[in-house]
Image: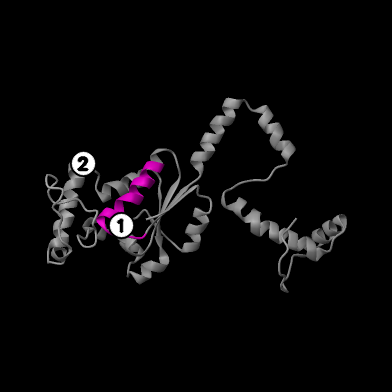
């Protein structure tokens, strides 16, 4: 039964054939057309619209039971595994520093390699990650980052004081150091990580709203980036099993 709730009066036009069908069904159920329409709208708002987003269908319990009984158990297991992988992973990348560019790219490329569908929504400073020029010059700040490893691994107690991080050239030095650590660990560059994502069919959404705020045009982004609003990404994320904000 639909939930009880406050009702409001609205006036709108309906297709004549649709109205006839509603009147016929309301008569069959011995209820008013108003009640039937409310039931249908509640069903759509609370259930039906989500079915459309994930491309699901409805079926009777009897039909579902007959399908289960007709399929071998190993076939059901395989189908369930395949269906589980098809549910997308939705990530939001909001930071544009070198160290913060890696987490969403690593997660998305790994998901793609596993056969999952994945999409990243780049917003605010995260747009730098898919900017043709800026992605090559991402930096890491030495200020306010107590987790940053010491300059010399042999002296773990040696930390760079915050006041030194404000000196000219310290951001470039910290960035060079991090790139060195990445290279030593044989970590792909941000450009290479993006290529891996593209090869794995990861969808790259560029937030249309914050593109204007950050002064970025569509032609300044990498070709694989899709300019999209929050509504488009939310529709995509609604069917995701895994959602992450970076």
Is 24 in front, or is 151?
151
Q: Which range of residues does the magenta coloring cover?
A: 94-111
Between 145 and 82, which is closer to the camera in this rendering?
Answer: 145
Q: Is residue 2 magenta?
A: no
Crowd around label 1: few <14 · some 14–19 · many ≥20 (10 Å): many
**First in residue order: circle 2 vs circle 1:** 1
On the image, which quarter does residue 74 sit in?
top right
Picture coordinates of residue 15, whole percent (x, y): 75, 65
Residue appearing at x 70%, y 42% in the figure: 59
Q: Which residue is mark 2?
A: 185
Kindly report the secondary structure that dominates the magenta region of the rendered protein: helix
Q: As drawn, is 191 to the left or to the right of 113?
A: left
Left or right: 4 in relation to 165: right
Q: On the rendered image, what quadrant is the C terminus found in?
A: bottom left
Q: Is residue 9 above or below residue 62?
A: below
Q: Secondary structure at mark 1?
A: helix
Badge 2: few (under 14), some or many (20 or more) residues near its Cα, within 10 Å?
Answer: few
Q: Residue under circle 1?
A: 129
Q: Residue at x 70, y 34 (%)?
A: 65
Quadrant for the N terminus in the image: bottom right
Indicate which disc residue 52 carries. none
Q: Is residue 174 above or below residue 208?
A: above
Residue 50 placed where, x, y %? Answer: 60, 53
Q: Position of residue 129 (x, y in %)?
A: 30, 57
Residue at 24%, 43% in the rendered image: 187
> Within the image, what quadrant is residue 37 found in?
bottom right
């Amino acid at each position: 039964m639909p939930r009880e709730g406050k009702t409001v009066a609205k006036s709108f036009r309906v297709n004549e054939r649709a109205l006839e069908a509603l009147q016929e069904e309301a008569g069959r159920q011995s209820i008013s057309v108003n009640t039937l329409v409310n039931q249908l709208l509640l069903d759509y708002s609370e259930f039906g619209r989500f079915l459309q987003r994930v491309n699901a269908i409805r079926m009777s319990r009897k039909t579902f039971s007959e399908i289960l009984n007709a399929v071998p158990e190993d076939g059901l297991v395989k189908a369930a595994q395949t269906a589980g992988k098809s549910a997308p992973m939705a990530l939001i990348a909001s930071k544009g520093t070198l160290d913060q560019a890696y987490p969403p790219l690593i997660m998305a490329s790994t998901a793609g390699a596993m056969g999952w569908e994945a999409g990243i929504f780049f917003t605010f400073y995260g747009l730098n990650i898919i900017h043709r020029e800026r992605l090559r010059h991402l930096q890491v700040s030495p200020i306010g980052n107590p987790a940053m490893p010491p300059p010399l691994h042999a002296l773990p107690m040696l930390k760079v004081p915050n006041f030194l991080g404000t000196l000219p050239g310290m951001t470039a030095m910290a960035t060079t150091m991090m790139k060195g650590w990445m290279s030593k660990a044989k970590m792909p560059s941000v450009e290479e990580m993006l290529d891996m994502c593209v090869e794995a069919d990861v969808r790259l959404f560029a937030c249309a709203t914050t593109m204007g705020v950050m002064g970025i045009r569509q032609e300044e982004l990498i070709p694989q980036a899709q300019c999209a609003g929050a509504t488009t990404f939310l529709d995509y994320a609604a069917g995701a099993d895994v959602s992450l904000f970076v």
